[in-house]
Amino acid sequence: MGLTGTHSRRQTAAVSPTPKIERKPLIRALTGVLPAERVSAANVDRLAYARDQWARNLLAVRNNRPLVAPPDVVVWPESTSEVLEVVKIAADFRVPLVPWGAGSGVCGGAMALHGGIMLDLKRMNALVDFSATDQLATFQAGILGQHLEDQLNLRGTTLGHFPSSIHCSTLGGWLATRSAGQSSSRYGKIEDMVHSIEVVTGEGRVMTCSRDEEPELLQLIVGSEGTLGVITQATLRLHPLPATRTFRAYRFADTQAGCEAMRQLMQRGLRPATLRLYDALDTMMVGLSDESEENEKPQGLRGLAQRLGRRARVMRGGLRDWALRNTLSHAKWVSKAGERLLPHVGSGCLLIVGFEGDISTVKTEANEAHRLIQALTGVDLGAGPGLRWFEERHAVAFKQSPLYASGSFVDTLEVATTWSKLQQLHQAIREALSQDAVVLAHFSHAYPEGCSIYFTFAAAEAQHPRAEKLYDKLWRRGLEAAVRQGGTISHHHGIGVNKARFMHDEHGPGLDVYRQIKGLFDPKGILNPGKMGL
Amino acid sequence: MPKRTLLKDWVSRVVGAVNTSFADTDRSSYGELHPDVVAWPGSVEEISSVLQTAHDANAEVAVAGSGSRTRERWPKRNNGKRADDQRPRIVLDTSRLTNILEVDETSQLVECQTGLELRHLEEALRRHGLTLGPFPDSIFTSTLGGVLGDPPPLAYSSLRGPLHGSCLGVTTVTPLGNVIATRVAPRRAVGPDISRLYIGSGATLGVLVSAVIRVYSLPETNMARAFLFPSAASALECAREMLAHDMRPARLRVMANEHSAGEVVMKQFPAQAALTLVFEGCAELVELDARRAEEIAAEHSGSELPQQLADHWAERYPDPNPEHLCHAWAPVRHSTAVAAGKAAADVLGNTVHGISYDQFSPHGCHMWLSVPEEVDKERLAEACTSAGLSPRGRRHTHARQHPLTQRLRQQLDPTRMMLSPEWD
């Protein structure tokens, strides 16, 4: 069983058909280098690894097709040398090998499109080395994000990397996809945090590269999504645990005014750990104030809209499903109405600013930010919204299932560009998506030169294959708009299968260089085939 | 192989007769290169055409910028072969590629061609209230292409990171003449970062034609501080703790006399170590950092040096690289920095003129050894090995050494057309 629909045919067309894999000799070879209990071709295991969290796969599951892309065999190595042996076997048998962390990727990057070996790294989860003096720690790549952070916290340090998937993603996955955490404006993305990596290439060699010795190779492997090698461990740059953390929220009339405050704040050299601006609709969904500690109680239409937003957030069961389906099935009209009404009845745009670190620095930076934002017409909303966001910051990913069950679907699209192009990019993608979906957006991951925009789009279509077609259409339109406006097609989710067809638009002839690099690292083409537009 | 005269004719047709030279005076101004043709291309299209021509003619191509660091390091021309057996040589001189293509004040980005000298770029940026960042003056005699193609070790600020790290995108021409323009975004998650392949490649993988660089607002204020410590260990520990406590000085250096004659900058403080700092940025943060620097230095037995000296070092940022001395440098971690200096000094004895530590991050720094030019190179190599200095650092270059990078070069430039400077 494979992927269906126009979208998938496009992706797989460039990949040469894999000959039928002879499972028995492959399993025999694998059990020669790994204990039998760490090699499985059982259907239950193959089912468990048949898809990652790509939203299109959830549509397949909803339509009773859970076996989207099953591997032939799953293995669980415990050391770099075992990974090396498995890679050598994959090369000898010329079968695909797909590295697997926690399977929470949202672009189909960890799917065994052509079967083969699924290499689950979760047993490689050790802290290998830690230096408090140098603020460096080496971990095996299969460690879960929260476990990694817990280990560092016990030693008085933090990585500063907090993706919303921190409970269900691994270090290897972060590095493979150039992941970003919610505090990236202060600590950077994972590619800024990595000092060195160890990788097993498709040639069957163990290679290490670092910022000091082979920086060019380090930045080739990071983000390569398992197409060049299997990342087995990494040394990371750490920070002392922050002594304090503060939040303050502000309301702006629109995203343009809010973005201007974000830009000036970053270019002034301040380093907020949290800097998030929600557009008007997203602000209504998030809510402007802490419900136990309201800073202002607007009256009239604006107050009503806020109260409705709060009610929608706590709605349960059938009533919510009914409301969702009806809202989303009229997405175009809902979007148009929202555009016209929100400026009058909406709550404006919420900006959350947070600082953490040394006490005196945090105090000075927060004061400086407050002065700057107020001068730019930001209305102070106090600490409430920021504190509430902090409490709920990892809960977002678990809200999808009810929406799918209601006959709708939702996905997120994250792009980035420079400040001077940001508003045009926001507008273009919003327009492209809102013909068939309800679109929310927030601006986060801000840098001195630009920012990422994180769109959430939801649409109603329960029937297969119409749902898949609508899903593909929305993605195509969104990414075409991103390319047209000069933005990048991904800020931190990666490419996988979903965005592969836009790799040429993103890289131009640079994609040929990537293909040549791939040829060197993986001459037999066994590593994660069918991904990244290669 | 076409005749050399034919090659000259082809190149002349691409870039124009006035931008091509076969004159001995021009050909002899590139050290040992002795090219057949010197071309001064003015656009990415011209460079692409010249490279395609060179490829068809099986010629060799060298890219020359200001030549400040490479002039004496090009591979020799004759190499023992008869003149007829040699491949024709073209020099692509980037001195016409000096345009600033765009200054995006909103995003604080500048796009410019790589033949532009950094001092001219800095002058232009200051007219917009912007700056490239806090780097030693010596950097500004280089071209942008030189700094990106072979990043000099001192182009680094603890506040901003390395200068080449500010490059967000490049336009480059491959040896086969293909133009690659990487998309500009603050960060991307779209596979390997191809632009990093070209930064530091010394023009062996292609010709860098233009780049988009992150720039910064001119600092609201700046403040220098200097402290004297009884030992290198206490000065280095103080520096480490400052960075661990969230301080980000624009410049930070430790000059250690403990194991050296201190003849570079510190003769007046024998057997001690000095730590110099420059803070810059918004006034409140600069004042806070300067105050905390004093507190942390005092905790490590550091005594503050006169403001006049701190300002002097800030204005004339001490260059550990004076011309009469020979140098080796390499990254070291905080935990090994003191031991590395001592190990090198044990091998070299009193010939060490200076040991300094620069390019600080919370995770380590770079150690510099300064010795007289006449010092025995094998002894210097032995000292470097004892100190654990990496080969790349010792070579004073980012020349590509990893076998995979070498093979990639072979793949991207199968006829080995692109020449690169040779380093010690």
Image: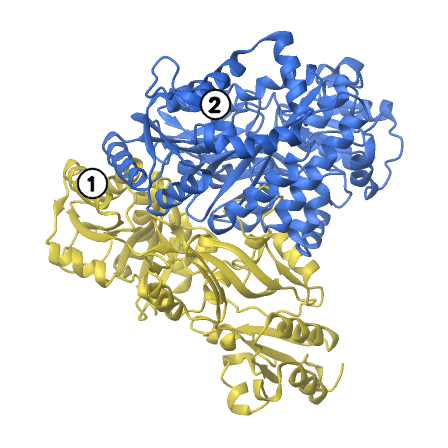
Name above or below for residue B329 compared with residue A244.
Answer: below
- Callout 2: residue from which chain? A
Q: Left or right: where does residue B295 sit relative to residue A529?
A: left
Residue B120 image-quadrant placement:
bottom left
Which one is in front in this view, the residue at disc 1 or the one at disc 2? Answer: 2
Name above or below for residue B204 compared with residue B336.
Answer: below
| Residue B256 visible in the displayed image | no
Name the disc covering residue B288, or none.
1
| Percent coordinates x, y for residue B172 in the rendering | 60, 63
Marks 1/2: CA distance? 36 Å
Name above or below for residue A386 compared with residue A431.
Answer: above
Which residue lies most toward the left here? B306
| Percent coordinates x, y for residue A350 in the rendering | 42, 30
Residue at image x 61%, y 22%? A122
Quadrant where the image shows the N terminus of chain B: bottom right
Shown in yellow, the chain is B
Q: Nearer the viewer, residue B90 or A343?
A: A343
- Callout 1: residue from which chain? B
Which residue lies most toward the top here? A317
Q: Dot 2 corresponds to which residue?
A: A286
Q: Amino acid at mark 2?
A: Val
Q: Left or right: where does residue A146 sit relative to residue A364?
A: right
Name the disc covering residue B316, or none.
none
